[in-house]
Image: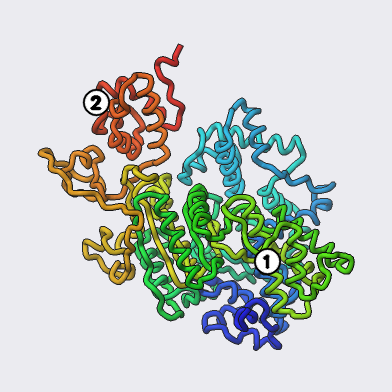
């Protein structure tokens, strides 16, 4: 461990309040010294917002202006809360409460429930999805596993937006949500779910907030007691606050204004959970006397990465975009972002794995590299490609580190060794702490070399290797540390869910990557239909997809690779196109060809070669009857383009799931009729149907390739598939 790494992981506690302010830039110092009244910190990605607010709390405590027990800092994840607690301890601000909204609310609810309601707090249900399944069964509705997850998500959204079952349908329509089932059915299941909870005397995760709000609203004495305890509030990631969390915060505050909020509207990516940036954007309306500080000095990313990030937001639209922050990199220049096109997804994964292997061989630590994608289903291809290339990896967003069975078992073994080490033959003649840990964990399956391949065995080894690496860092920082000291450190980290870094490439969805950073980031699958995702239909939904890509870009410190594939599988139809969000930001994109310039213009941005051998569409044939592209308006001359009613290289808004369902249905029709599949519908016609997703026979008939004969023969079944229903062939009807 270098001296710089040591000072970062285990810094010295400042010896005075003034020393807490040392090293802060002017804007961070302004945040740290603004201790009274409402404060709003607009903090861009990589600008040191956590540093600013923890130094603010620590400065107030060390200067005697804030009582530690009167401060409540809230955020959204156990990891973020654990990091905040750790930083406050390092700054000498002991006794400050740093919790998630749910953790803070649960603590209060458990304390006040006997007094406010009577008896003990109902049990929190472990598996909500099973309760939803029971509710659906009570309504005589049959849901598969995916539908159960979707309906569960709708119930969660309803509760955090304070929507009751009777109001669900109207609220979902107003919010533009894509309901997984008929809204009336979802509302029925939601109502039955609430009834079942009451019958079984259980509550769910969202009830913790709802019940705390209810107690604070109904019992003035309880509200006054909470307000007497907590007098200063700090809210991190304020753009992610839901209406329910905002209501809880207002009840905590009462008529006071000792509140500091920190957020960035351009990083609002969780609206599907009820999060909204409106509370951040309206903060100065609610608090006209608020101190507002903007943090725009980006200490994380190179100017080249920041340039691309700023360019993404420069094209954004909507209210959040109107309040975007123009980042200014504070780092030395680095390499230009690389844009790469591949023939298919396996080629894209193999290309990324090959480049990652080269980076690791050149000395870049595997733990400083990440592969980020839009949906978790994309990970499998990259897991296999990395395993084939001999690259270690970890999958983020799965089971929490300290909840993994192998980690729990390793903890038991280390604790036993710390108590009875002198009687353990494994530890004979082993003096230093790292060697002791390696000796103990060798009995749990750790080996000096990782196992071959991927899967559960490799994941188990990576977990144990993370503990070995942590022991090495801990011993370097504290040379006299014993095994018992390490066990105590592990217990503290487990309580805070502060997992050690696994020395492997991180595979993660863009949503789960929020709040993290790496030296090298591979943004993969950046194609139309994936970013923006096909079901992002409204302008606001598309803009949130843009913000999601912005979050991905700003995870990179030094190197950024952006890639997409023209088709899903080798030999497939090369119908995909790079995301519209890259227009003007890469060479050869539509905006770049038209000569548009600006903060995100393509000039100077390198476009990588296609490592998968894919090529652009070939020369177009002519057609006597011209038509116009429905995307860009250009005159069409190619028969295939005429069928799609768009240029070959214009963005496709095809629903790929719908396309695959249509292909499966077509294959069945072809088998039953004994004719080739293209005689039912050609691939081009299926693509056109998947792009149009017609709602009725009139819309379906307008698609080239669907004549009157095929409309009469197949129309009803195709429309059923487009509507998400199981098609019923005439032969199946009694």
Q: Which residue is mark 1?
A: 82
Q: Residues within 10 Å of mark 1 (few under 14, many from 20)?
A: many
Left or right, 485 with respect to 376, comes to right
Q: Position of residue 391 (x, y in %)?
A: 53, 60
Q: Position of residue 110 (x, y in %)?
A: 79, 54
Q: Earlier in the sequence, mark 2 or mark 1?
A: 1
* Quarter placement of the N terminus: bottom right
> 592 or 500: nearer the eye?
500
Q: Which residue is mark 2?
A: 707
Q: Choose top left, top right, bottom left or bottom right for residue 434.
A: bottom right
> 218 or 249: nearer the eye?
249
Q: Which element is circle 1 on? A: helix
Q: Position of residue 409 (x, y in %)?
A: 76, 56
In the displayed image of the protein, which residue is found farthest to the top?
734
Residue at 69% in and 67% down: 468
Left or right, 717 with respect to 1, comes to left
């Amino acid at each position: 461990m270098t001296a710089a790494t040591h000072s970062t992981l285990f810094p010295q506690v400042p010896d005075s309040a003034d020393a807490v302010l040392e090293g802060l830039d002017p804007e961070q110092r302004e945040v740290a010294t603004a201790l009274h009244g409402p404060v709003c910190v607009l903090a861009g990605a990589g600008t040191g917002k956590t540093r600013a607010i923890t130094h603010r709390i620590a400065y107030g405590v060390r200067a005697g202006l804030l009582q530690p027990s009167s401060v409540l800092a809230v955020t959204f994840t156990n990891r973020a809360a654990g990091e905040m607690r750790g930083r406050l301890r390092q700054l000498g601000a002991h006794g400050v409460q740093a919790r998630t909204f749910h953790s803070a609310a649960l603590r209060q609810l458990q304390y006040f429930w006997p007094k406010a309601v009577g008896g003990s707090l109902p049990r929190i249900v472990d598996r909500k999805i099973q309760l939803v399944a029971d509710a659906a069964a009570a309504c005589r509705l049959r849901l598969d596993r995916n539908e159960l997850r979707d309906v569960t998500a709708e119930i969660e959204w309803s509760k955090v937006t304070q929507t009751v079952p009777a109001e669900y349908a109207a609220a979902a329509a107003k919010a533009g949500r894509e309901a997984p089932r008929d809204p009336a059915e979802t509302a029925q299941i939601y109502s039955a779910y609430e009834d079942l909870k009451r019958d079984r005397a259980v509550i769910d995760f969202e009830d913790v907030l709802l019940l705390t709000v209810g107690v604070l609203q109904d019992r003035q004495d309880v509200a006054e007691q909470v307000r007497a305890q907590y007098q200063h509030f700090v809210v991190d990631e304020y753009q992610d606050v839901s209406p329910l969390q905002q209501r809880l915060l207002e009840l905590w505050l009462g008529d006071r204004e000792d509140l500091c909020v920190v957020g960035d509207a351009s990083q609002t990516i969780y609206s599907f959970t009820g999060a909204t940036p409106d509370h951040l954007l309206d903060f100065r309306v609610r608090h006209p006397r608020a101190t507002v500080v903007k943090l725009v000095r980006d200490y994380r990313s190179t100017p080249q990465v920041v340039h691309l990030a700023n360019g993404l937001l420069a094209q954004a639209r909507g209210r959040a975009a109107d309040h975007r922050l123009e980042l200014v990199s504070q780092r030395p220049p680095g390499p230009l972002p690389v844009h790469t096109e591949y023939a298919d997804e396996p080629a894209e994964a193999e290309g990324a794995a090959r480049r990652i292997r080269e980076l690791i061989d050149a000395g870049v630590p595997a733990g400083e590299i990440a592969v980020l994608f839009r949906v978790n289903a994309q990970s499998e291809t990259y897991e296999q490609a990395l395993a084939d290339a001999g690259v270690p990896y970890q999958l983020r967003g799965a089971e929490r580190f300290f909840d993994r069975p192998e980690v729990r078992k390793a903890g038991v073994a280390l604790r036993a060794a710390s108590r009875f080490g002198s009687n353990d033959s494994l530890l004979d003649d082993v003096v230093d702490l790292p060697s002791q840990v390696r000796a103990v964990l060798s009995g749990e399956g750790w080996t000096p070399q990782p196992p071959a391949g991927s899967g559960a065995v490799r994941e188990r080894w990576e977990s144990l290797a993370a503990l070995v690496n942590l022991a090495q860092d801990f011993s370097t920082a504290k040379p006299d540390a014993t095994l018992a000291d390490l066990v105590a450190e592990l217990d503290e980290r487990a309580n805070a869910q502060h997992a050690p870094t696994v020395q492997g490439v991180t595979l993660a969805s863009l949503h789960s990557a929020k709040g993290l950073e790496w030296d090298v980031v591979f943004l993969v699958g950046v194609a139309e239909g994936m970013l923006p995702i096909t079901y992002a239909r409204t302008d606001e939904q598309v803009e949130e997809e843009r913000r999601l890509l912005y979050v991905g870009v700003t995870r990179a410190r030094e190197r950024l690779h952006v890639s997409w594939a023209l088709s899903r599988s080798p030999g497939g139809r090369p119908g995909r196109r790079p995301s519209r969000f890259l227009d003007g930001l890469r060479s050869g994109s539509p905006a770049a060809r038209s000569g548009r310039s600006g903060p995100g213009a393509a000039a100077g941005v390198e476009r990588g070669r296609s490592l998968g051998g894919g090529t652009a569409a070939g020369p177009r044939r002519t057609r006597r009857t011209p038509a116009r592209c429905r995307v860009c308006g250009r005159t069409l001359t190619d028969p295939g383009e005429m069928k799609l009613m768009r240029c070959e290289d214009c963005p496709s808004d095809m629903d790929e799931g719908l396309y695959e369902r249509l292909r499966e249905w077509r294959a069945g029709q072809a088998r039953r009729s004994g004719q080739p599949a293209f005689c039912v519908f050609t691939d081009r016609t299926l693509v056109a149907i998947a792009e149009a997703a017609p709602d009725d026979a009139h819309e379906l008939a307008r698609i080239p390739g669907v004549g009157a004969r095929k409309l009469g023969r197949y129309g009803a079944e195709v429309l059923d598939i487009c509507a998400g229903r199981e098609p019923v062939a005439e032969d199946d009807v009694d």
